[in-house]
Amino acid sequence: MKVLFNEYPKCSTCKKAKKWLDDNGVAYDDRHIVENNPTKEELRDWLSRSDKPVRKFFNTSGMLYREMELKDKLDAMSEDEQLEVLASNGMLVKRPLVVGDDFVLGGFREKDWEEKLLG
């Protein structure tokens, strides 16, 4: 199995997650989430592979998220509008984001990663 590893290389959590992938022999394609921002169509596809609402794909601790005051705006938006905003800038996307054939992992929780990637 080979997964898509969406990361921001300067992110310390992404570095830790990448090391975990390497240490556990997980094959992946690396994607710089800012230089190669996910498209709305990709995000819609990934959303369908996850069991999460689109809100969980947002990097809620990021500066851009706070500057855009999205916490207060997302509830008033449709899913389509939320995906449009998410696709506008890779810094809005929760990272790391691992995409497999039938799952998506947002953030780095070692237990979840072990279950999906090694299980």
Image (cartoon, rainbow, N blue to C red):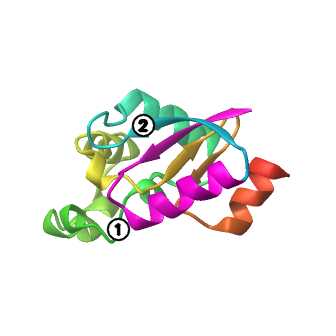
For the view shown, which residue lies furthest in the right direction? 119
Q: Nearer the viewer, residue 44 or 99?
A: 99
SS for callout 1: loop
Magenta residue check for 22 = yes
Compared across the picture, whether 117 is left or right of 53 comes to: right
Which residue carries the number 2 mark?
31
Q: Residue at x 67, y 43 (%)?
A: 103
Q: Amino acid at mark 1?
A: Thr
* Above or below 89: residue 92: below
Q: Percent x, y for residue 32?
A: 36, 40
State which quarter of the image contains the N terminus: top right
Of callouts 2 and 1, the N-terminal one? 2
For the view shown, which residue lies furthest in the top direction? 41
Q: Residue at x 32, y 58 (%)?
A: 10
Would you call the spot at circle 1 few (<14 residues within 10 Å), some (14-19), or many (20 or more)? some
* Above or below 97: residue 30: above
| Rendered image quadrant of residue 26 | top right
Q: Amino acid at mark 2?
A: Arg
| Rendered image quadrant of residue 76 | bottom left
Magenta residue check for 103 = no
Q: Residue at x 33, y 72 (%)?
A: 61
SS for callout 2: strand
Q: Percent x, y for residue 16?
A: 52, 63
Compared across the picture, whether 31 is left or right of 77 comes to: right
Which residue carries the number 1 mark?
60
For the view shown, which residue lies furthest in the front direction? 23
Would you call the spot at circle 2 few (<14 residues within 10 Å), some (14-19), or many (20 or more)? some
Rounded to the nearest whole Å, what is the CA distance between mark 2 and mark 1?
A: 20 Å
| Numbered range of the magenta stretch | 1-23
Q: Residue at x 35, y 51 (%)?
A: 8
